[in-house]
Amino acid sequence: KGSAILDELYAVIEARRGADPSESWTAKLLAKGLPKICQKLGEEATETVVAALAETHEDLLEESADLLYHLLVLWAAKGVKPDEVYDVLYRRRVTTDIKKKKQRKNEKK
């Protein structure tokens, strides 16, 4: 599980890039271009926030999945690979760990 499902979903999105838009929501979204993809991502982000504040746990899970899907479509449209984002997250975590270690060392002095 974990990031593997995101990688698999990204591969499906890439594979649907040239598909018939009348047969694939992903192909239709990609064919409509960046403005439509960004609009959908914004809608899903809002729906996720609403679910977090006022709906059930299950609703939040469903909206979160929709949000991730639309984010992956945006990445595909812009040529961003999931591994590139994972690398940024990893670098941030490592940098944060180093800063915390230095901070603890300075506090002991």
Image (tube, rainbow, N blue to C red):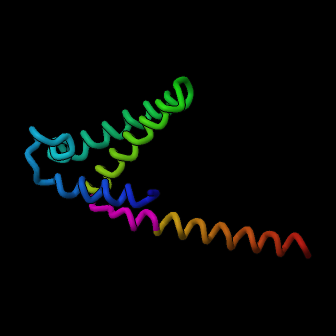
Name the one closer to the observer, 32 or 24.
24
Say if 109 sits above or below 38 in the image: below
Closer-to-camera residue (48/77)? 48
| Main SS class of the magenta portion in the image | helix
Q: Quadrant of the C terminus?
A: bottom right
- Which range of residues does the magenta coloring cover? 78-86
Task: Tell me the quadrant of the picture where the N terminus can be found.
Answer: bottom left
Residue 79: give x, y in percent of width and height. Answer: 27, 61
- Within the image, what quadrant is residue 35 found in? top left
Q: Image check: 69 left or right of 51?
A: left
Q: Say which residue appears at 61% left-offset and 71% top-offset.
A: 94
Q: Residue furthest top?
A: 54
Write the residue at 9% across / 38% down. Answer: 22
Residue situated furthest front in the rendering: 1
Q: Residue at x 24, y 53 (%)?
A: 13
- Residue 38 point in image, percent of width and height: 31, 42
Q: Is residue 85 magenta?
A: yes
Q: 57 or 93: nearer the eye?
A: 57
How many numbered marks, from 0 up? 0
* Vertical order, 98 against 80 (above or below): below
> Outermost residue, right direction?
109
Q: Nearer the viewer, residue 73 or 36?
A: 73
Residue 34 x, y percent position in the rendering: 24, 46
- Which residue is at 33% across, 44% downward? 70
Is residue 100 depicted above or below 10 in this figure?
below
Say which quarter of the image contains residue 81. Answer: bottom left
- Residue 51, given in percent of the width and then of the height, sits at 50, 29
- Asked if residue 48 is among those painted magenta in the image, a careful observer would answer no
